[in-house]
Amino acid sequence: MNYFFIFDEENGAWAMTQPGKVVMVLLIVVAMLLTIFIADKKQRAEGDKKISPRQLAFCGVSLALAFVLSSIPFLKIHMPLGGSITLFTMFMICYTGYLFGARVGLLTAFAYSMLQFWGNTTYILSPFQVCCDYLFAFTALGIAGLWMGKKHGETIGFIVACILRGLFHTIGGYLYWMEYMPEDFPEKFAKLYPVIYNYSYILAEMILTVIVINLPPVKKALTQIAKTAKG
């Protein structure tokens, strides 16, 4: 057991070791591949197209950019229990869904959740806590694909995805992280701590991104990227 988990007495939580992360990621990847295989087989039987090599390549590039950008905090802002304002990280994932639909978007977002889980110091309070902090929260970004092809879809889908990601983080905050609330946090806002904590950095990045992607030169560039990605 100690090979995969170690107890951090200072934080009062189980921390997953690198071998533990490898095993968990492998198990999740196997489950994901089985799910993709079953879903793809069903969709092909119903006449849906398979994910094309072009789509896979674009998603791979977006995934890599998102992961790199996630390690570069904007203005060096780091939240004490995790989270930071980054430069367009969430949009990189949401945009794949907007271009190719919810199926591709959710798969890309799921892969991104695994990269986030792998690349961060992970404290295990419970399996559901891991899901709230990583699996559900980051996979939720793929929901932007429901707005594929719709007017202002890239903006609306992005906003909804960001709010949904924050919701999962907030649920995890109420269930598992309330006891880590700073002692000097205003008492009258104590019950809103998970909401304030998580949406403070998520909404800041969301607002910054929405402003930038709606600038005329950026919108023109995104239109050109969409044409290239779709062939």
Image (tube, rainbow, N blue to C red):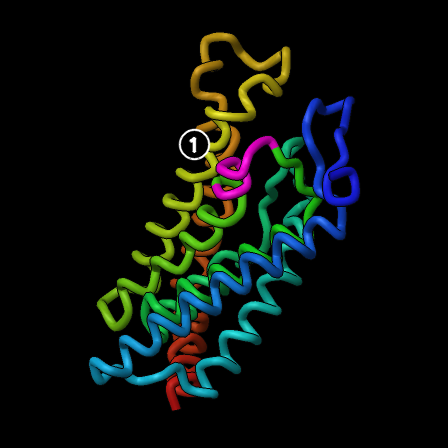
Could you say where residue 37 lies in the image, as x and y percent from the top left?
A: 41, 74
Q: Is residue 15 magenta?
A: no
Check the picture and name the quadrant holding the N terminus: top right
Q: Which amino acid does label 1 sit on?
A: Ile
Secondary structure beneath dot 1 equals helix
Number of on-image labels: 1
Specify the principal SS of the magenta part. Answer: helix
The residue lying at 28 percent from left, 82 percent from top is 44
Residue 28 seen from this side: yes
Position of 166 relative to 157 (above/below): above
- From this view, report whether residue 185 is shown above or below residue 5: above
Q: In which quarter of the image is the C terminus?
A: bottom left
Q: Which residue is drawn at 60% across and 31% down?
A: 125
**Residue 224, image x and y in percent?**
41, 83
The quadrant where residue 114 appears: bottom right
At 43% from the left and 39% from the top, the residue drawn is 168
**Does the image show residue 71?**
no
Q: Is residue 119 shown left or right of residue 202?
A: right
Q: What's the magenta region?
A: 125-131
Residue at which label 1 appears: 171
Q: Is residue 130 magenta?
A: yes
Q: Residue at x 76, y 35 (%)?
A: 6
Q: Nearer the viewer, residue 224 or 217?
A: 224
Residue ranking furthest to the bottom: 231
Relative horizontal placement of residue 18, taking residue 143 as reference (left or right): right
